[in-house]
Amino acid sequence: MKLSWKQFNLELKYIFKIARGASLVEPIIILELEHDGIIGYGESSPISRYHESVETVSDFLKIVDLSRFESPFQLEEINRYLDSLGSGNTAARCAIDLALYDWVSKKLNLPLSKYLGIGNLPTPVSSFTIGIDTLEIIEKKVHEAEKYPILKIKVGLDNDEEIIRTIRKITDKVLRVDANEGWRDKFVALEKIKWLKDQNVEFIEQPMPASQLDDLKWLREKSVLPLIADESVMSSKSIPQIKDAFDGINIKLMKSTGLHEAIKMINTARAMNMKIMLGCMIESSVAISSAIHLSPLVDYADLDGNVLITNDPFEGCENENGKLKIIDRIGHGAIPKK
């Protein structure tokens, strides 16, 4: 097996701002795994919150030696080997994982969903993300997102209510509110949630920092809306630790090291009677298509990373007005644009 990779800079239509930072360009790594004349495509969209960058991803990939394995079908053995290389590097490992699954399902001449045993189960409707911005730009974004039935609203600064009131002047559609750890005082967080209850909000995502687990447990006991963990959950092993603080989890392939661990997270969360959302970073159609194949197994989807950019280098599974569509193509379905 041969690995090769290159950096690609995804360009966003608008500055993407959340509680801890903003960007207009997101660098990613596109990976190719070649074996027996078949190429599997993977992607890494590293985030500084998890101590990764395109440089750390590239450094990790340089030490990976898959020539010791006879075939990409040795998924379990390959994952144990990658585990032996140390902790972290989740987005880097995700690129390898997605390429492996793409290669295996292509070799079997199957769409990824059928290889995973999911078949033709219905996909959920994805939310469309509105990042923090000036009220004027937020109004513009909401109007442009008219065709999407569910909006995910980024908050976590001092003008949260202003943002929601601005959106409510335009639409009454369902909102999902994501604070990205921005509310640091549990009493303030509780008051914000009480106010949001009357704003047709479905749930609150990661209201407080992951480090404040006791405060999050306190908040969940008193919250009038469900709480969904994002930064607080990385893998299946972390779910039992946070189950008393949240009603559900947000699985992102870049955090989980890819599909292999994401499936374990789905099974673990179901066993604990928790809701499941499948989310994303700013990503190309390689990572988004991979996640869409898994989406029939979850309750909520937030897989819009590729529709927020203007220069997707791949085409793959589709987001049609929020409805996720698996295309009839082998592998995860993402192919380079010509």
Image: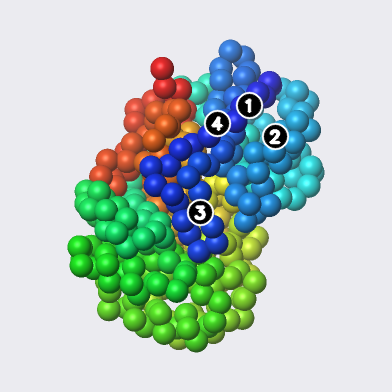
Measure the alpha-carbon separation of dots 3 and 4: 19 Å
Query: Few, some or many C-alpha atoms within 10 Å of disc 3 (few <14, some 14-19, many ≥20)?
Result: few
Residue 112: x, y in percent?
46, 33
Image quarter in which the N terminus is found: top right
Q: Is residue 100 visible?
A: no
Residue 208: x, y in percent?
54, 73
Q: Is mark 1 on a helix, strand or loop?
A: strand
Q: Which mark is residue 261?
A: none
Determine whether 245 is above or below 154 in the image: below
Asked whether 103 or 129 is in front, the reply is 129
Determine whether 219 is above or below 312 in the image: below
Query: Few, some or many C-alpha atoms within 10 Å of disc 1 (few <14, some 14-19, many ≥20)?
Result: some
Q: Can residue 304 be seen in this view?
A: yes
Whether tag 1 and tag 2 are in contact, CB under 8 A, the answer is yes
Three-letter code, disc 2: Ser
Q: Mark 1 points at which residue?
A: 5
- Left or right, 49 with reference to 22: right
Q: Name the residue under label 4.
A: 8
Determine whether 258 is above or below 329 in the image: below
From the image, state whether disc 1 or disc 4 is nearer to you. 4
From the image, state whether disc 3 or disc 4 is nearer to you. 3
Q: Mark 2 points at which residue?
A: 58
Q: Is mark 4 on a helix, strand or loop?
A: strand
Measure the alpha-carbon separation of dots 3 and 2: 23 Å
Mark found first going from the N terminus, 1 or 2: 1
From the image, state whether disc 3 or disc 2 is nearer to you. 3
Mark found first going from the N terminus, 1 or 3: 1
